[in-house]
Image (cartoon, rainbow, N blue to C red):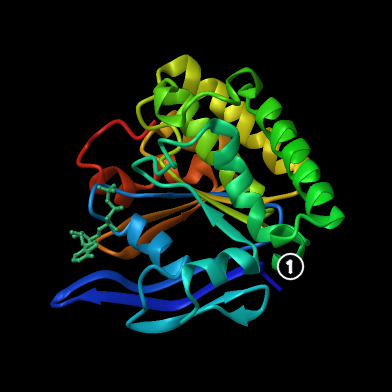
Amino acid sequence: MPLLKIDNLSKAFGGLKAVSELNIEINEGELIGLIGPNGAGKTTVFNLLTGVYDKTEGDILFQGKSICGLKPYQVTSRGMARTFQNIRLFSDMSVIENVKIAYHQRTAYTTMSALFRLPGFYSGEKEMQNKAMELLKIFHLEDKANETAKNLPYGEQRRLEIARALATEPKLLLLDEPAAGMNPQETQELMNLIRWIRDHFKLTILLIEHDMSLVMGVCERIYVLDYGMIIAHGVPEQIKQNPKVIEAYLGEEVV
Ligand SMILES: Nc1ncnc2c1ncn2[C@@H]1O[C@H](COP(=O)(O)OP(=O)(O)OP(=O)(O)O)[C@@H](O)[C@H]1O
């Protein structure tokens, strides 16, 4: 059974079909790319997967169960987390608070123990603090734990967003243009980090990306969207040479 099965999914905005009869299957542990020209429908797919938009037609099965109609927080608790094209951090909160907030969805202590500061609350808080610090270390942000999120350089804010998504302990991680705004060296480091977190956390990853060197370098299979439809699907070597893909990018260098 695939971890994620997108089954004939469509989404219309009035007369515009942003996503049209989409079929995608992703198996546990895979690292998959979703690419396509501007306006192809990639972010709409993420919004459909995470309960931000309601589908017009079709179904989304996650671990064999339909997740259509669930609210974003319910999708998160089923084990799907995402980052955004435009970074969405709690910008006035500290770096570590950003991560701890995500852990709150997963902590075992009850409202009663939190209200009355019972022992369960303190052990829960301590555990959360330790786990958050561990994540920050992985993303080389431990020295910035108490800085205000908005004061971090752009590349670090992007890494913090991924750390925060991981704090919800997802099975499937959706990354929307993780390398946007990064220089080539940062992009290379991010590529290594994405592979590493997939292996370390035994994750499945679906990523949207315009940076072709990142997509081709890191993804095992790639789906190409154009006008809401899949025009190509395969391993990076097949995608690079696919005439429909080259045409969709209007002669832009695909690699
Ligand atoms: N909430 C909305 N209301 C109306 N139209 C929308 C909405 N969201 C997206 N669209 C339209 O759907 C189409 C697909 O948009 P989407 O943002 O999913 O593309 P994309 O592939 O992510 O593009 P980009 O690479 O530029 O981010 C576009 O024509 C867009 O204008």
Report how many numbered discs are placed on residues in the image: 1
Q: In terms of depth relative to the viewer, which is nearer, 159 or 7?
A: 159
Residue at 61 percent across and 23 percent down: it is 141
Query: In the image, what residue type sits under mark 1?
Result: Met
Q: Residue 117 vs residue 4: left or right? A: right
Quadrant including the N terminus: bottom right
The part of the image, by quadrant, that contains residue 191 is top right
Does mark 1's beta carbon lie closer than 8 Å to ligand 1?
no
Vertical arrangement, residue 38 with respect to residue 120, above or below = above
Name which quarter of the figure residue 178 lies in. Answer: top left
Instruction: Indicate the position of residue 11 as horizontal and vertical percent values.
Output: 30, 75
Side of 175 relative to 218 (left or right): left
User: Where in the figure is residue 93, as x and y percent of width and height?
Assistant: 48, 36
Q: Is residue 200 left or right of residue 218?
A: right
> Could you tell me if residue 29 is visible in this image?
yes
Considering the numbered disc 1 on the image, is that residue within a helix, a strand or a loop? helix
Which is more toward the observer, 135 or 223?
Answer: 135
- Res. 217 visible in picture: no
Q: Report which quarter residue 240 is drawn in.
A: top left
Q: Position of residue 187 (x, y in %)?
A: 48, 24
Q: Is residue 43 above or below residue 1?
A: above
**Residue 109, horizontal then vertical, whole percent:** 77, 61
Within-10-Å neighbours for mark 1: few <14, some 14–19, many 20+: few
* Residue denoted by label 1: 112
Quick check: 165 above or below 227?
above
Q: Which residue is located at x 64 percent, y 63 percent?
A: 79
